[in-house]
Image (tube, rainbow, N blue to C red):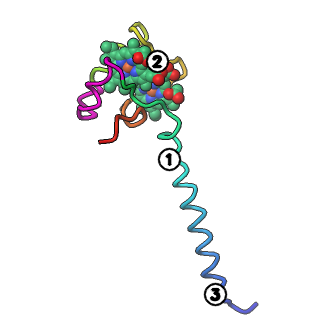
Amino acid sequence: MKYDKNKTWLYNMLFLLGGGAILLFLWRAPAETTKRLPQDETHMKFHAMEKKEAEKFCEECHNPDGVAPMPKKHPPKYRCLFCHKQNKK
Ligand code: HEC
Ligand code: HEC
């Protein structure tokens, strides 16, 4: 078979596009579906704080015996605010 330079280019492009689409999908998925940090009185102050600072307080209430325990099937909970997004600055 004759080596077809044009087609090689095309296949490489398709491969890259496919990979890019999957990456983009994985990257976007959690942010789109996970509940954001609520905008109520309890949580308002955390929107303004540095993520790591704010996260020290979450488990005071969101622990198994707290006022608002997290669901039993909650994903790994380390770094709350990477998943439960704050307001956009
Ligand atoms: C003083 C207690 C308290 C602290 C501290 C607190 N929360 Fe909450 N949180 C609550 C209560 C009570 C609810 C349930 C009622 C509600 O939706 O406001 C709640 C609800 C939530 C929800 C669910 C919202 C929804 O739409 O159902 C998320 C997500 C959440 N908190 C994340 C956090 C994160 C992240 C932090 C740390 C930055 C945090 N909370 C700190 C009391 C607290
Ligand atoms: C890896 C991502 C991730 C991390 C990190 C994370 N969560 Fe969640 N959380 C979720 C998902 C997904 C749900 C399922 C319900 C939903 O759509 O919000 C959830 C649900 C919750 C709920 C219940 C919301 C409801 O439906 O009422 C609370 C409260 C909550 N998380 C608090 C926290 C706190 C506090 C932390 C840090 C200690 C934390 N989360 C860290 C992804 C995450």
Q: x and y percent of residue 33 in the render?
A: 53, 36
Please name the residue that numbered disc 3 is placed on. 6
Where residue 17 appears, as percent x and y from the top left, is 58, 66
- Name the secondary structure under disc 2: loop
| Magenta stretch in the rendered image | 40-55
Disc 3 + disc 2, Cβ < 8 Å? no
Mark 1 is on which residue type?
Answer: Arg
Q: Does the residue labelled 3 lie within 8 Å of ligand 2?
A: no
Quadrant showing the N terminus = bottom right
Using the rendered image of the protein, determine whether residue 71 is visible from the camera's viewpoint.
yes
Question: CB at mark 2 closer than 8 A to ligand 2?
Answer: yes
Task: State the SS at label 1.
Answer: helix
Whether 67 is drawn above or below 48: the answer is above
> Which element type, helix, strand or loop, lies under badge 3?
helix
| Left or right of residue 31, residue 55 in this image | left
Determine whether 57 is above or below 33 in the image.
Answer: above
How packed is label 1: few (under 14 Cα within 10 Å), some, or many (20 or more)?
Answer: few
Question: Mark 1 highlights which residue?
Answer: 28
In the image, 5 versus 61, the foreground residue is 61
Image position, residue 56 (x, y; %): 27, 23
The vertical placement of 10 against 23, above or below, is below
> What residue is shown with label 2?
70
Image quarter of residue 53? top left
* Distance in Å between CA atoms under marks 3 and 2: 55 Å
Of the residues shown, which amino acid type is indicated by label 3?
Answer: Asn
- Rendered image: mark on residue 81: none
* Residue 24 percent coordinates (x, y): 52, 54
The answer to if 18 sits in the magenta stretch is no
